[in-house]
Image (spheres, grey):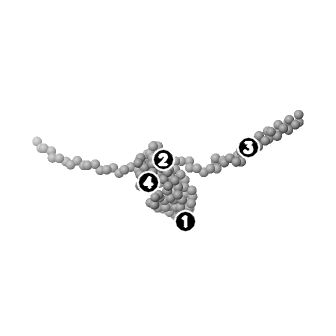
Amino acid sequence: MKLRIVASIAVGAALTLGATGCSMISPQATTIDFSASDGVNIPPSGPLDVRNAMVIADESGTSGNFLAAIVNPTDDDHTLIFGFGGVTTTLEVPARDSISLGVDGNEPILLDGIDTQPGATLPMAFQSGDAEGVLIDVPVLDGTLPYYTEYVPREAPTPSATPTPSATPTP
């Protein structure tokens, strides 16, 4: 009888230890960094943080508006240099400030010649401070979702022909 009780306790302890030990070898989902948005966060490689970076492209995929939040948590002004295919853009970010491209009165930055269809990614380079630049695949989206419609690049309207006034007969 005592042997049966001891064996039951040993089996129960082994099952309990086995069930709780799973977390020792399984990664915890709450410790994994991810972008909880449609854009990507650029890993810090300098004094500036680039958050929720994305490109909203037109239907043809030839041009797109670059949207992102650039944050400067330092006490000094810094410059962000970013671009694709050899074309770069420079953006000054004041100390302890942030710039949200495409919102708060800041225009998105138009990227011409991206030649990337919505749903794909655009390899873009980012560099700030003395840090080495990083190459990140930035998602390219379109105006399918209503909250991105206003960011789709629009072609400038072509002027229409103006009718010339004709002489009207006088009675």
The residue labelled by disc 1 is: 130
The residue under the point 41% across, 55% down is: 112
Residue 34 in percent (x, y) is at: 58, 50
Instruction: First in sequence, mark 4 or 2: give its number.
Output: 4
Residue 20: numbered disc: 3
The residue labelled by disc 2 is: 119
Of tags 3 and 2, the one toward the viewer is: 2
Instruction: First in sequence, mark 3 or 2: give its number.
Output: 3
Residue 13: numbered disc: none
Residue 114: numbered disc: 4
Instruction: First in sequence, mark 1 or 3: give its number.
Output: 3
The residue under the point 15% across, 47% down is: 167
The residue under the point 46% across, 45% down is: 147
Element carrying mark 1: loop
Q: Nearer the viewer, residue 4 or 101?
A: 4
Instruction: First in sequence, mark 1 or 2: give its number.
Output: 2
On the picture, is 2 further left or further right than 86? right
Distance CA(mark 4)–CA(mark 2): 13 Å
Element carrying mark 2: loop
Residue 13 visible in image = yes
What's the residue type where badge 3 is placed? Thr
